[in-house]
Every structure is written in C-alpha cells, then in structure tokens.
Image (tube, grey):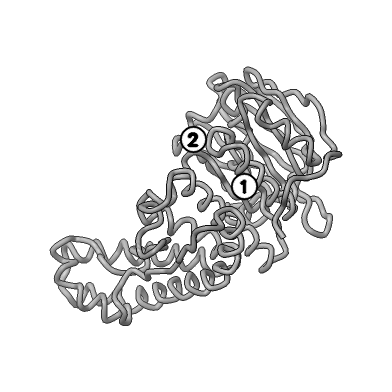
Amino acid sequence: MRLTRFHIHALRNIHEITLTLHPHFNLFLGANGSGKTSILEGIHLLALGRSFRTRQSQTVINHQQNQLACFGEVEDSFGAIISMGIEKTRDGEVRCKLKGELCDKLSQFATQLPLQLLTPETFKLLTAGPEERRRFLDWGVFHVEHTFTGLCQRYQRLLKQRNAALKQFPRSSIEAFEKELVEVGEKISHQRKQYLVSLIPFIVQAREYLLPDHDIEVHYEQGWPNTTLEAALRDALKQDQRLGYTSVGPHRAELAVNLKGFAAHQVLSRGQQKLLICALHLAQAKALYAATGRKCLFLIDDLASELDSPNRQRLIAYLAKEGHQLFLTGVEDAPWQAVCEQYEGQMFHVEHGNITRTHGFTGLKAPIESPA
C-alpha cells in the first residue's frame, strides 16, 4: 500500500497543503513546533480516525477553523487508486468517505492503510502497562482476522454488563452473562495466540538483525489460570463481587517480553529497549505482508533523537529492503545526509505550517549493510 497524494486542511498550524509523496522515503525537516509531526498526525488521522498525540479532537483543529479535513489517494498492491477522506468538526461530528462513498466504519479505513508508528511514546512499550502491549498485539490480529473487531466489541459490551451485575444483582443474574462472555473471550484469546505463533519467527529475524546478542522470549499470558475461562470466572466470582469488576479474562491478558527470565526492560539498556521495540514493529509489518500481501506505512517521528547514527541507519536499511513507504521527521538535516545519499526519496522543509519540497535523492551511493 502506498499513499501517493495527501491533502490537509486546518490541522493544527497547517492551513492547506497538498503533497505528492514518494513511494519509498519521505523526510520532513524543520524546527520544533514547525508542523512536521502534524503531517504524520494527519496520516494517522486519515488511516485510523484519531490522533496519536491527543484524544481531544478539538485541539487538533486549527484555531481559526471549525473543522479539519484529510484526504488521500492510496495505491493498492494491484496498482488501483483508492480515495479516502475524513472530516472532523469542533462539535465532534465525523464524516468519512472511502472510494467516494460515505463510510460509517473506521475499521474499513485501517485495513486500507496499515500503519506502524514509531514515536518517543512508542518507545515506552516495554515499560508501560499491559494494555499497551495488548494493543500492540491486537493491531496484528485485527489485520489478519476479520472477525476480531466484532468479537472485541461484543466482549466489551458483555464485560460491562457483568461488571454492572457484580455490583447490584444476585449470582443467578451474573451467570446469565457468562455463557456468551466465555464463548467470545476464548475466541479472542485463541486468535491472539494463533497470531503470536505466526509473528514470533519474524520477531526472531528482526531481533537478530537489530539486537543480535540478546535472545528474547515472547509469550502470551491469557489473563486467567490454566483452566477454562468458565471455571476461572466461577472461581473468581466472590472476589469479583467484592472488587466490583471482572478480574479474569482476555481483558487482563499480557504480552510478556522476557530476557533471561526477567522482563526485558529490567535487563536491557534504554537504547537496547528501543532497538527491541523497533524489531517488534518490523516483525509485525513483515508478518502482515506474509499473511495478506500488504505493505505497511511507517510513521517515524524524530528518530535522530531516539537512536544513534549506526543503529538509525541499520533500521532504515531494514525498512528500505522490505520496501515500506517511510515518513520521517527530523530537526536538522545533518544526521540524515548519509541516509539520504543511499535511498530513493524526497525531502521537505517545514516552517510555520508551510511545507516545501526541497529536493529528491536517487540513492546513487552504495547502501550500507542491509539485512539478508
């Protein structure tokens, strides 16, 4: 999948801009606050209907306008062009169009434009709570299991009903919700496990390239003891009534990332953790391509401040070899000169929300070492 054209209207300090994008490498350089991260934010909005920087949509809309809009043209793996657009107003209205038709399901957008996001917040994946790692895992399941979103929505509805019943109804009323909750919860857990089995070989491959001296163990903890979910709910009922919420189930699952029997973040340095997190995202992109034939777009914000030059170049080499479309931001061009000389792409200068294409690069110099 390639984003070939992208139009932004009234997104933060970007008033109006249309960009023709390179299929491989797009680099946006500018001072802090210039608007370069807003370009990545706009692509994320187009694909997923939300910002990765805030949950407050009103703050994303330019202060002089009442609504923002992002439109894009996506080239699929067969060369067909798919049009996408999203509009958001200050009062919370959202309107989406896909192929010229109104669309009421944002999940349809996400399947058209699969994204991998690497930002300073992304690099907290190993130290954040389990919810972040579940979200990481569920991204992959969503893209390969078409029933997954519906299952998760049903599960959340049933879970909310059971939690409400725990606080005010007798046991018989609580148990009325459990049959369907068990059925849906075990399907979610099964799909997660199956996806992780397919993902692990790609994690190993990416980890061996970026972090060759560390053997990482990744496994799924389902969120209840080694028994059926039905038995786990029954055993936890008294505790759940006391707590007022459901303490077992796939909503309590964990993607454990370990090294030598310890959580990886307890053993690895901060820089090594960042490389491991990059490896996890690279693995997801490769697993998606293996399963569906679709390439990811990578949105990478301020990589020069997160990785040193050798590791930054190794990461870009891996991404370039895999053929992903890259969107990167940086404060100054010096850290990027060596990279730009080796790959096909284009550079933009961003200042006060104005975006100017400065030049392209053709990759005439021999590339640095890339993965086998």
Decide: is 227 above or below 358: below
Kindly indicate whether the residue at mark 1 contacts the one at mark 2 (C-beta within 8 angstroms): no
Identified at 33% across, 68% down, the residue is 223
Q: Which mark is residue 179?
A: none
Question: Dot 2, how many residues are within 10 Å of its Cα: few (below 14), some (14-19), or many (20+)?
Answer: some
Closest to the observer, 333 or 368:
368
| Amino acid identity at mark 1 | Ala
Closest to the observer, 266 or 188:
266
Decide: is 9 above or below 158: above
Structural distance between the alpha carbons of marks 2 and 1? 15 Å
Instruction: Where is residue 117? Give x, y as percent.
Output: 57, 46
Closest to the observer, 212 or 170:
212
Identified at 30% across, 72% down, the residue is 224
Q: Which residue is mark 2?
A: 57
Query: Quarter-wise, where is residue 69 in the image?
Result: top right
Q: Which residue is mark 1?
A: 47
**Which of pointers 2 and 1 lies earlier in the amino acid sequence?**
1
Instruction: Where is residue 111? Give x, y as percent.
Output: 64, 57
| Amino acid identity at mark 2 | Ser
Q: Secondary structure at mark 2?
A: helix
Query: Quarter-wise, where is residue 22 in the image?
Result: top right
Question: Dot 1, how many residues are within 10 Å of its Cα: few (below 14), some (14-19), or many (20+)?
Answer: many
Instruction: Where is residue 12? Give x, y as percent.
Output: 56, 26
Q: How many marks?
A: 2
Q: Secondary structure at mark 1?
A: helix
Side of 110 where 52 appears, left or right = left
Please tell me whether mark 2 or mark 1 is closer to you in this view: 1
Side of 58 where 21 appears, left or right = right
Instruction: Where is residue 34? Give x, y as percent.
Output: 60, 21
Identified at 54% across, 70% down, the residue is 195
